[in-house]
């Protein structure tokens, strides 16, 4: 069995949620003795081939980046040369460039489409791309969705329910190493505070306005730490200043992985305030669960976020754009020791039961074997 993971890019290029998942899958399959190579696009005009222990990583030369897509003629050329080597091509959606390349080449092998998200923001691109997307879904032998909720409510997937398999994203706990002194320093800095943590890009769908407003309803014993950067950071900092919350809301900006993990370990509770379906899964919730942190997250229509964090099991879920509800949920958990311990235990148990890399890889191998019978 030989697999090609086919996506927009491979870390460290364009490091994001989908790219991180491709890396976890590739490394996990290698550890399970499944041959797996990768094809994606580079962040420059050079084609590179990395022949590493776990397999080949093809990075096609970049022509242009636009509409969140890495355009590359070289990608098509490479696929045309190597596609016959593989039993299965596992394509990660959304990526119009990869879908277009498959449509042109039309390989004869099995096709697995990993549906991370609908295309929601790029409306113009979707109008042009939709015929290729429809072809890809018809051509797919299996469509993988990351949660049953997203599979059920995605308008694009409604005609293909018979092809869908659910494989939640799993993470490797070894990549969540924290640093004891950093953890102690964080706890010492915010001594006698209940530490709330949120991590994510400061962009339109994250709902940070509501999260910041919610802090107004909490006492001074709470502090909210926000890790991340983005186009709305200045606006959010101004909002915090105008509300007089500069001692209760702290923007940490970008931090390295060790620091990020240390904040996850040091915090008391994780909060996810996203408001649009663009947040399809929120793997950061899984990372918080791995550290046994209860979660307050939002109920986003059609998203898998509230399937990942299940109400009264791993945390509490609240309506979107509702600062009062966020504040009440935070207080309910933090001011009830028995509930806190129950949810902290439930969060870690849910991580172990559903969201480890090993579980994800075993589910994928089962799907691959089913296709190749």
Image: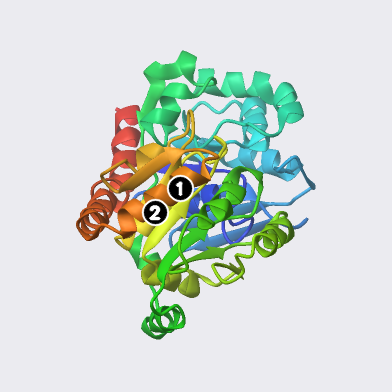
Q: Residue at x 52, y 17 (%)?
A: 138
The answer to whether the residue labelled 1 contacts the one labelled 2, judged by CB atoms less than 8 Å apart, is yes
Secondary structure type for disc 2: helix
User: Looking at the rendering, which quadrant does residue 366 occupy?
Assistant: top left
Can residue 325 be spotted in the picture? yes
Q: Residues within 10 Å of mark 1 (few under 14, many from 20)?
A: many
Q: Residue at x 32, y 41 (%)?
A: 310
| Depth check, front residue: 46 or 214 | 214
Q: Dot 2: few (<14), some (14–19), or many (≥20) neighbours within 10 Å?
A: many
Looking at this view, is 17 or 321 the one in front?
321
In the foreground, 352 or 330:
330
Decide if residue 17 is on the left or right side of residue 306: right
Relative to 168, is 197 above or below? below
Q: For numbered disc 1, what is the local secondary structure?
A: helix
Is 114 situated above or below 346?
above
x, y percent for residue 125: 74, 29
Location of residue 89 in the rendering, given as x and y in whole percent from the top left corner = 49, 36
In the displayed structure, does residue 249 sit left or right of residue 238? left
Numbered mark located on residue 326 in the image: 1
Q: Which residue is mark 2?
A: 330
- 189 and 306: which is toward the camera: 189
């Amino acid at each position: 069995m030989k697999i090609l993971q086919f996506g927009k890019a491979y870390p460290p290029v364009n490091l994001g949620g989908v790219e991180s998942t491709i890396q976890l899958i590739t490394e996990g399959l290698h550890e399970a003795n499944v041959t797996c190579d990768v094809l994606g696009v580079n962040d420059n005009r050079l084609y590179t081939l990395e022949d590493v222990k776990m397999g080949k990583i093809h990075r096609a030369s970049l022509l242009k980046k636009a509409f969140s897509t890495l355009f590359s003629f070289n990608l098509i050329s490479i696929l045309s040369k190597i596609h016959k080597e593989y039993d299965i091509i596992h394509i990660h959606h959304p990526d119009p460039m990869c879908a277009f390349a498959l449509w042109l080449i039309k390989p004869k092998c099995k096709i697995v489409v990993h549906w991370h998200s609908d295309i929601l923001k790029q409306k113009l691109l979707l109008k042009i791309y939709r015929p290729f997307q429809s072809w890809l879904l018809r051509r797919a032998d299996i469509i993988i969705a990351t949660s049953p909720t997203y599979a059920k409510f995605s308008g694009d997937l409604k005609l293909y329910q018979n092809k869908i398999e659910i494989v939640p994203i799993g993470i490797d706990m070894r990549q969540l190493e924290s640093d004891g002194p950093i953890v102690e320093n964080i706890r010492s800095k915010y001594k006698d505070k209940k530490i709330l943590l949120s991590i994510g890009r400061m962009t339109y769908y994250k709902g940070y306005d509501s999260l910041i407003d919610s802090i107004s309803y909490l006492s001074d014993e709470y502090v909210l730490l926000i890790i991340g950067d983005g186009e709305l950071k200045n606006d959010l900092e101004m909002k915090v200043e105008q509300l007089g919350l500069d001692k209760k809301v702290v923007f940490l900006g970008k931090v390295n992985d060790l620091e990020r993990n240390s904040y996850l370990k040091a915090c008391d509770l994780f909060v996810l305030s996203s408001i649009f379906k663009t947040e399809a899964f929120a793997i950061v919730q899984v990372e918080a669960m791995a550290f046994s942190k209860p979660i307050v997250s939002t109920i986003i229509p059609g998203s898998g976020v509230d399937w990942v964090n299940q109400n009264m099991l791993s945390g509490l879920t609240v309506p979107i754009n509702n600062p009062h509800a966020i504040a009440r949920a935070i207080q309910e958990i933090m001011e009830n020791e028995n509930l806190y311990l129950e949810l902290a235990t439930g969060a870690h148990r849910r991580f172990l039961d559903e969201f480890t890399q090993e579980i994800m890889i075993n589910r994928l191998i089962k799907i691959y074997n089913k296709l190749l019978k």
